[in-house]
């Protein structure tokens, strides 16, 4: 009976992972499509950032309510809803007309991106919650390191697919154009949606959901602190990655193809490091006593990277600024990947078993809040002070992340109750 439950859990994990791969492939392509298409049309760095603001803001609410909905109606239904909403977002974007004014075009794209932001975070919350369920089903068979390995592989492979999506977005834009590229990706998602609804149990993950709004925010100390660290961590990445890096590289003489390929390779490498993160972290029997100190150490190391890049750019060493940035971004990506993988493991370790979807949703709402702030500041700071201003903001946010990580509880996750 235990082996049967473990087998079903592993099967569901594999199906959810495959579905999320497909979703992430199109989501990464969408980001590159929008960024390159509108940069080519002459939009300013701040306007480019503005195009993604509702996308990120919508994710905050989507994660909060998505966890509650997944607990109430089941993970399969929420995964299907997320895929359906993404298809709707692509259809809306494809309706953009070249004859519209700049203001109307921006408003339409922001609205459609908001729809896609809801889709992304509903899908992410449902997918991450499914891992917790699969791990619980297999725990009796083999609990040693399973959760960390599964989370690391899921997160890492997802980001590798996102990197491939960056490349795919540039390729589709170049070969098919903006509108046909969106239709092609919508058709792919329709096939994935069909696979999800026909292969996963419809009530997967259904549990007793919170009855009032307060319970959605009343989390354990570990979840709350980790959410704060997550806000700062992802804000620190996007504050220079969303607008600053691609615009700086293009201004340094890189072509669109070179920029898209580099960002794709960086994201794929980042995903591979995430998947391999358990190899860089000493494991503990209780699931936290080694992982929490590791999160603190890697957070500190990460905070030093943007400081070092800024110092190199200001030193007048004669090195090409774009090469300094590329090397620095590779170091940043390695440390960030291990940090992110550790955080993704810790949220599931801290999450309550009965309402894990709600805890995960709350945590990824914090993730979306960090991306929102980072995206906004990326355009503002780059326009105000260039790449150095973005790097300074990143270093400040990473300091906040490190301080929050210092306060994380280190005892066994099962000892944490709800306040």
Image (tube, rainbow, N blue to C red):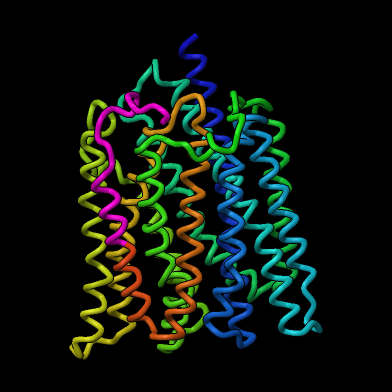
Q: Quadrant of residue 418?
A: top left
Image position of 412 with respect to 176: above or below: above
Residues 342 and 264: in front is 342
Residue 307 higher or lower than 30, as above or below: below
**Picture coordinates of residue 386, whole percent (x, y):** 39, 84
Q: How many marks?
A: 0
Residue 319 spot, x, y in % from top left: 23, 86
Residue 223 position, x and y percent, is: 39, 39
User: Which residue shows up at 24% across the image and 72% down it?
Assistant: 307
Image coordinates of residue 138 in percent, x first then y, are 44, 21
Q: Residue at x 26, y 55 (%)?
A: 402
The quadrant of the rendering that contains the C terminus is: top left
- Left or right side of 159 for 411: left
Residue sitting at x 70%, y 43%: 81
Q: Nearer the viewer, residue 268 or 300?
A: 300
Residue at figure coordinates x 27%, y 37% from the top left: 409
Assess whether residue 416 is covered by the magenta stretch.
Answer: yes
Left or right relative to 13: residue 295 = left
- The image quadrant that residue 48 belongs to is bottom right
**Relative to 259, 209 lies left or right:** right
Q: Which residues are magenta?
A: 398-419
Q: Judge whether residue 131 is colored magenta.
A: no
Please identify the residue farthest to the top as the structure is shown: 1
On screen, 353 above or below 220?
above
């Amino acid at each position: 009976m235990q082996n049967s439950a473990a087998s079903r859990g592993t099967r569901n994990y594999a199906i959810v992972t495959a579905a999320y791969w497909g979703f992430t492939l199109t989501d990464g392509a969408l980001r590159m499509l929008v960024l390159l298409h509108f940069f080519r049309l002459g939009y300013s760095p701040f306007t480019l950032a503005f195009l993604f603001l509702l996308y990120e803001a919508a994710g905050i609410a989507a994660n909060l309510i998505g966890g509650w909905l997944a607990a109430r109606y089941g993970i399969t239904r929420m995964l299907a809803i997320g895929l359906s909403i993404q298809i709707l977002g692509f259809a809306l974007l494809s309706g953009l007309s070249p004859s519209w004014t700049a203001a109307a075009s921006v408003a339409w794209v922001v609205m459609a991106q908001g729809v896609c932001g809801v889709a992304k975070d509903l899908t992410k919350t449902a997918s991450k919650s499914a891992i917790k369920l699969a791990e619980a089903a297999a725990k009796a068979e083999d609990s040693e390191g399973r959760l960390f390995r599964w989370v690391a592989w899921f997160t890492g492979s997802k980001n590798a697919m996102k990197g491939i999506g960056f490349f795919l977005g540039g390729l589709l834009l170049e070969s098919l154009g903006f509108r046909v590229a969106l239709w092609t990706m919508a058709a792919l998602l329709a096939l994935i949606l069909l696979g999800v609804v026909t292969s996963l149990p419809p009530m997967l993950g259904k549990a007793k959901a919170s009855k009032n709004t307060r319970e959605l925010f009343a989390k354990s100390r570990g979840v709350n602190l980790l959410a704060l660290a997550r806000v700062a961590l992802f804000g620190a990445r996007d504050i220079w990655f969303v607008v600053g890096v691609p615009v700086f590289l293009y201004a340094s003489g890189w072509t669109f193809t070179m920029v898209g390929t580099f960002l794709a390779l960086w994201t794929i490498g980042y995903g591979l490091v995430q998947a391999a993160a358990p190899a860089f972290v000493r494991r503990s029997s209780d699931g936290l006593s080694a992982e929490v100190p590791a999160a603190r150490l890697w957070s500190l190391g990460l905070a030093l990277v943007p400081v070092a890049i800024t110092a190199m750019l200001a030193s007048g060493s004669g090195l090409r600024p774009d090469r300094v940035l590329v090397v620095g971004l590779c170091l940043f990506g390695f440390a960030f990947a291990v940090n992110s993988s550790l955080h993704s493991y810790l949220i599931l370790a801290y999450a309550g078993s009965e309402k894990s979807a709600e805890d995960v949703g709350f945590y990824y709402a914090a993730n979306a809040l960090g991306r929102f702030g980072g995206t906004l500041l990326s355009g503002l700071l780059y326009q105000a002070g260039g790449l150095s201003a973005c790097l300074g903001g990143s270093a400040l946010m990473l300091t906040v992340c490190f301080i929050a990580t210092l306060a994380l509880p280190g005892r066994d996750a099962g000892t944490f109750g709800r306040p």
